[in-house]
Image: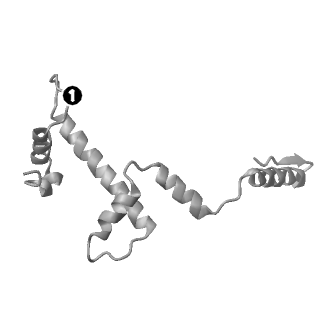
Amino acid sequence: MMDIEETNGDIDTSTNIDVEIIENKEKHENEEPSSSKDVSHNQKHRYLRLPLARVKSMMKMDPGCAMTSQDSVFLITKATEMFIEFLAKEANKQLGSGKRKTIMKRDVDVAIDNNSCLCFLDGALS
C-alpha cells in the first residue's frame, strides 16, 4: 500500500510510489509467461468431472450442430454436471432416514414427481 507522509504541509510520496512500482514489477517478473488462453482452458478443465471429448461427440450427433467451440463444449459439460448433481440430491432426499444408502430408480421417479422443475423428465425413465 502507498503511505503518504506529511512534512510541513508538503506531501512526500515519491519514495513510496517508487517502492510500490518496484514491488509490482518483481511480482510480474516472477510469474511464468504463458498465454491467458492456455491458463483459462486448463483452469476450466480442472473443474470438470465429465470428459469434454465425450460431450463434444454427443453434441456433434445433432445434425444441426456442425461445429462446436471449446467454450460451448465447456458450458454444456458444466451445465450437465450441475443438472446431474441437482437430480442426485433430489433423489437422495427420498432415502430419508431409512437404512438404504443406494439411490434406486423409484427414488429418482419420486424426485421427478415431487419437483416441478423436473417435470419435463416425467416418463423419461420408463
Amino acid bearing label 1: Lys
Chosen colour scheme: one colour
User: Which is nearer the eye, 119 or 72?
Assistant: 72
The answer to whether residue 47 is above or below residue 58 is: above
**Rendering coords of residue 94 (x, y %):** 15, 35
| Residue at screen point 61% across, 62% down | 36
Q: Which residue lies furthest to the top in this view?
A: 99
Is 79 on the left or on the right of 42, as rendered?
A: left
The answer to whether residue 61 is above or below residue 30 is: below
User: Which is nearer the eye, 122 or 60?
Assistant: 60
Residue ID for mark 1: 101
Is 28 on the left or on the right of 112, as rendered?
A: right
**Rendering coords of residue 101 (x, y %):** 21, 28
| Residue at screen point 81% across, 55% down | 21
Q: In which quarter of the image is residue 35?
A: bottom right
**Rendering coords of residue 16 (x, y %):** 85, 50
User: Which is nearer the eye, 32 or 115?
Assistant: 32
Q: Residues within 10 Å of mark 1 (few under 14, many from 20)?
A: few
Q: How many marks?
A: 1
| Residue at screen point 34% across, 60% down | 55
Q: Under tag 1, what secondary structure?
A: loop
Is 34 on the left or on the right of 51, as rendered?
A: right
Is 91 on the left or on the right of 55, as rendered?
A: left
**Rendering coords of residue 18 (x, y %):** 86, 54
| Residue at screen point 32% across, 50% down | 82
